[in-house]
Amino acid sequence: MKYFIKKLATFIFVIMLDQTNILSNEILSGNEVSYNDQQDTAKVYLIDEVVITGTRTAKKIIDVPYPIQKIDNYNFKFDSKIAVDNVLNDVPGLFMQNRYGNHDVRISIRGFGSRSNSGIRGVRILLDGIPESEPDGQTRIEAIDFNSIGSIEVVRGNLSSLYTNAPGGVINFLNDINFDKNFFVNFNEIGSYGLSRNGFKTGMIADNFKFLLTYSYHNYKGYRAHSQDYWHIINSILQATPDPFTKVNIYTYYVDGLIKLPGSLTKAQFNDDPYQANPRDISRDTRRVSKKGRLGISYNKFFGENKNNEFELTGYIAVKNFERTAKDFRIMNRNVLGASARYINHTHLFELKNEFSLGGDLFLQYGPVETYDNINGRRGDGVKALVDDRTSNAGFYILNSTDLIQDRLSLLLSGRFDKVKFEDKDRGLDARSDNRNYEAFTPKIALNYKILPSIALFASYGLSFDSPAGNELDNYPTSSTYPKLLNPDLKAQKSTIMEIGSKGNLLFDEWTFFNKVNFEAAVFNYIIKDEIVPFDVAGVGVFYRNAAKTNRFGIELGSDVDIYKNLNFKLSYAFSNFKYDEYIARIDSITKVIDIPYSGKYVPSVPKHNLYLAVSYEQPLVEDIVGFVKVSDRFVSSMYVNDANTEETESYQLLNFLIGTDIKLGKFNIMLSGGVNNLLNKKYVGFININSDRKEYYEAGEPRNYFGILNIGYSF
């Protein structure tokens, strides 16, 4: 039987070679296991242990029953780092629509996040393990500087049993604190349409201390009219390790920037000139000014006779000042308080490994929202509305992972209880107040079986919970209780999720071709009740309602293969068949209300096919000089722009080219690179404004553009 299993595993591996996904870019350890029954042609290497904070456990990736990708900054060091899709473009199941560079980006995992016309939903975003997502799940990522990032953890699928509002997964951006010597790097990037990005990163080491500081300045005129932006971003980490089992980190950041918004276009406007701005947004001078800063402190301690217990406590405060102009002129001042704690115990039960974890999170955000008339982009004299906004989240989770068969089969059980509370108080003449509470318990069970030490099968079943975001609760003129402040009809979105998959990491070091392979494949099905979807009300604005039942079936595949020596091939593919099973949409206007059946319609803003291919070659040219070249291609199939499926975008294909060199001159390091994105200059829809009442669905993606990078570093 053992011989049969090994032969079957080899057969499965060969079949999956051209279809499967890169699990991670982990460094392979030297723990070599030979299998004579495979005629010594394959040698399997174990993946090094890594701390996966996104899953709130410390395990080898191969032992965690989720689709996980861990991306080291080496993998995107030659690439442009303006937007999040520059660094996450090869993750299967992850689809990104950039509205204006890195700002107002829509990140969608398995359709979660696709409903958002502003910010990110359904995917928990962390920076150094601290939530960038707000208590209601809404996220903006201005504070993330990709020149400062050391690695990125992407956990796809239902993480609601561990995090608030994370049915799509978790993305954790980790700043580059794991350096081993003092250094200074100057970053410089220029590009088409007035792109200029400059900054530095420095790291210093002393006895039991590390300090990381980064600064970036970004200025961009934009490829559309009325789309310029600028940003200042400062990040720092101070790390103290008084002993080998204790670590204290102090995190800070500050962001200050402005972005002008060109708005969405009708199909006629888009066909006439996709890069024009909506005249209404020009007249309003639609823009966003953001200033925010955060201070966080984490304490981590291993204790016990065998150091098999771990405790971590994190606290953070933040201040946010936002200015938004659209139909109105709105000023939002937010104060943030948050904390999380977790305890982990490693032990043995009946001589089998067991890990138990208990943790919780508290998160509070509050402050006034002032609304004025927008007079050609200027603030009107009188306050139209003044509302005190307060959002809080309290949740706790329990997690237990135990081996059923030593180092082969493991069982993971987890569950989380969350309560998300919204409170609004009108300080105007009406003196209204309102509140909404959402709470749920979301359990999950998962199995992980290792066919070989570096090939695993996994399966899971669980529930998820996704509360509305604060702005999604805005009431509208024809709701059941208007003019109350909060929409009383909007329910939380809940899902039942099943998933199976496989992942692995192999070396065939005696083969000339295909001697290194990472792969992953996953099949999932989500049954979603009361899916939250956006809609317009007679041009008054964007509001949200529930679709009764949605079915999402999907397949994610990919591979990362060393074809020959330094020639690498990457593939990621996602098939998404997402439909409304039951959905009667109430179309509201000032004069009438109509109920229209949308059952059987496809979920908008999700491509059925999303394929990414990349071939790269890295070669030492002479001593201490390395050359690099990469060609990548992205294919995205057509997408519907509304629930009625009356209009859709055209499919598109984006071809990119990149070339670079890395030069070491003693203690100096010079990195030069340049590239062309959208080489064939395709016109395509880069962002969909879902369910627009004015039929202004379309926002153009970036045309052909060039960039060049010069980084100069010194180690001391």
Image (cartoon, rainbow, N blue to C red):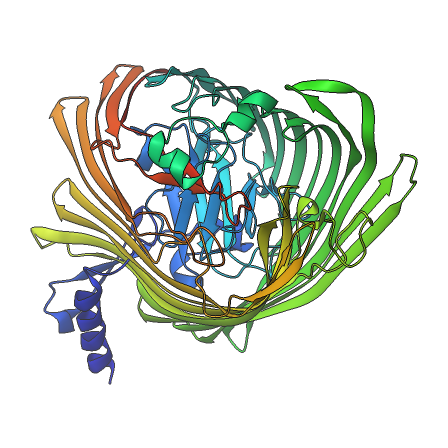
Query: Total marks drawn?
Result: 0
Answer left or right for 330 relative to 353. right
**Where 637 falls versus 317 (above or below)?**
below
On-image quarter of the C terminus: top left
Residue 710 percent across, percent down from the top left: 31, 16
Q: Residue at x 40, y 48 (%)?
A: 95
Residue sitting farthest toward the left: 512
Q: Position of 346 compared to 503: left or right?
A: right
Q: Position of residue 523 (x, y in %)?
A: 37, 68
391 or 174: nearer the eye?
A: 391
Q: Quadrant of the N terminus?
A: bottom left
The correct choice, above or below, for 42 with respect to 251 in the image is below
- Is any part of residue 344 visible from this angle? no
Location of residue 188 with respect to 479 vertically, above or below: above
Residue nearest the observer in this picture, 475 or 680: 475
Residue 88 screen position, x and y as percent: 38, 42
Q: Is residue 35 shown to the viewer in this render? A: yes
Residue 451 quadrant: bottom left
Judged from this view, the residue extending furthest toward the front is 591
Q: Is 647 displayed left or right of 440 in the figure?
A: left
Residue 506 located left or right of residue 142: left
Taking the view exactly as shown, the residue that stands out farthest to the bottom is: 1
Nearest the camera: 676 or 463?
676
* Above or below, comparing residue 320 to residue 522 in the picture: above
Percent position of residue 485, x then y: 80, 47
For the point 29% across and 35% down, the residue is: 683
Along the line of sight, which residue is nearer the eye, 128 or 240? Answer: 128
